[in-house]
Image (cartoon, grey):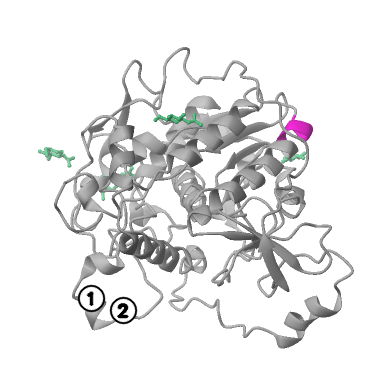
Amino acid sequence: MIQRWQKRKTQLPLVVLVFFVFIVSSILYNERNIQQIHQNHADPDPVDDHHPPSLKQASLLESTKALPVVLDRFSTCRSTVKYSGRKAGRAVDTQELDRPRGNGECDLFSGKWVFDNSSYPLYNESDCPYMSDQLACHKHGRPDMGYQYWRWQPHNCNMKRWNVAEMWEKLRGKRLMFVGDSLNRGQWISMVCLLVSVIPADKRSMSPNAHLTIFRAEEYNATVEFLWAPLLVESNSDDPVNHRLDERILRPDSVLRHASQWEHADILVFNTYLWWRQGPVKLLWKTETNGVCEEIDGLRGMELAMGAWADWVASNVDPHKKRIFFETMSPTHLWSREWEPESEGNCYNQKTPISDEGYWGSGSDLPTMHMVDKVLSGLSSKVTTINITQLSEYRKDGHPSIYRKFWETLSPEQLSNPASYSDCIHWCLPGVPDVWNELLFQFL
Ligand SMILES: *[C@@H]1O[C@H](CO)[C@@H](O)[C@H](O)[C@H]1NC(C)=O
Ligand SMILES: *[C@@H]1O[C@H](CO)[C@@H](O)[C@H](O)[C@H]1NC(C)=O
Ligand SMILES: *[C@@H]1O[C@H](CO)[C@@H](O)[C@H](O)[C@H]1NC(C)=O
Ligand SMILES: *[C@@H]1O[C@H](CO)[C@@H](O)[C@H](O)[C@H]1NC(C)=O
């Protein structure tokens, strides 16, 4: 299957790739839904992008070149050179240790989707007070409900049934934190929606959207939090709302900005992937004081960032005190011809999962997977992998497509061709991320 894809990939014309990059970037750059999470009171206008870039701040970088400045969205490279081959930190020991499994010998990530409308969905979309308008597909007009009714069935065992009371007991007195990009934010919202039903309204709270956003449940003295860190390391895209930028600049040797937030959590769930798929990124090393960036392709940039993250985990995590999870890449469904040859389209109007076992689409990059495998295998005593890629690959029906809030006004041209603006990256809720959380539940 994998080989089949590789063969196809080499035949992709350039124009298709350019279009892919366009779609991914227009969706990633526009994910400004987060205010909507807190919009219990009608507040239809997102307030971001309303702060005009301050010229003063932009020129500040110019005048303080002696110190490594904290990157923000106004940061620029004075010049850019090719990547020098420099590495950050120490190499993580990559010897393979026993990888912890949730359920004896059973591989929970290998299985199939089973239609089950008696136990799913695990919550109702409209009952979740923190639902995001980016993910509330039914509310935004999705007519078919099938995407809510699928249960993940591993081949050789059963998953423990989701149990909200048991989950709260696991979380009692603890901080559970999701760290990453909008896919991980979707999983965080899913987790909050899964958990919130048993918490009375006056015994819970949600902090305003920020770099770190916190859901708190008083009775359990527990929090479920989301930290915006799409590249894991410090970058110019660390503003949770304003990260629509022409170039990605990151510090491959600095996880500190984010680690200072996440280090206090008891259970951490990390992800990173799609932001590395938009072309080259620029490295600005901490010791570089003249604003000279090095350009590197996304995969190698991600490898450096994963290395910095792995170093942090290796030297800071005591597995008896902290649980660390890493979510593998979330697939996209941008080309329907990958599962239905000759067809033109994407996830729009897809109503059922793919049943072809082992199906693998272009949204899941194999070199990235191999790199992640390598990094994680060096950390296997400290990090549990939640391998969502294959199971989510089957779910071409699970994306919002046109059934979400869009913040840009859509042109008549776009409206007449729904596939042209469909979101085939994020996932409807209730839906696929609920199952990612059920998997997490198996390992806690
Ligand atoms: C579940 O699906 C079956 C078959 O499609 C249908 O007959 C039944 O009414 C559904 N039940 C519920 C609770 O939606
Ligand atoms: C969702 O709402 C329906 C009625 O609208 C109810 O029968 C069902 O139990 C609810 N499901 C959950 C998980 O709360
Ligand atoms: C609540 O949990 C925090 C850790 O998240 C702990 O430091 C604190 O002592 C707990 N408070 C109570 C009253 O249990
Ligand atoms: C995830 O599963 C795929 C097969 O579906 C496998 O190729 C890959 O190595 C796994 N990755 C990790 C990090 O476990």
Tell me the tag on residue 415. 1
Q: Amino acid under label 1? A: Leu
Identify the secondary structure beneath mark 1. Answer: helix
Identify the secondary structure beneath mark 2. Answer: loop
Relative to residue 349, is residue 268 drawn left or right?
right
Query: Is the C-beta of the residue carrying label 1 under 8 Å from the nearest atom of ligand 2?
Result: no
Q: Which residues are magenta?
A: 313-317
Q: Amino acid under label 2? A: Leu
Residue 315 highlighted magenta (yes or no): yes
| Residue at 15 percent of width and 54 percent of height | 343
Relative to residue 240, is residue 403 drawn left or right?
left
Principal SS element in the magenta part?
helix
Q: Residues within 10 Å of mark 1 (few under 14, many from 20)?
A: few
| Residue at 59 percent of width and 47 percent of height | 300
Instruction: Pinpoint residue 254: horizontal percent, then vertical percent.
Output: 75, 51
Instruction: Pinpoint residue 196: horizontal percent, then vertical percent.
Output: 48, 47
Q: Mark 2–mark 1 contact, CB under 8 Å?
A: yes
Q: Nearer the viewer, residue 331 or 154?
A: 331
| Quarter occupied by the N terminus | top left
Q: State whether residue 145 appears in this view.
A: no
Residue 404 highlighted magenta (yes or no): no
Instruction: Pinpoint residue 344: horizontal percent, then vertical percent.
Output: 17, 58
Instruction: Pinpoint residue 441: horizontal percent, then vertical percent.
Output: 49, 30
Residue that label 2 marks: 410
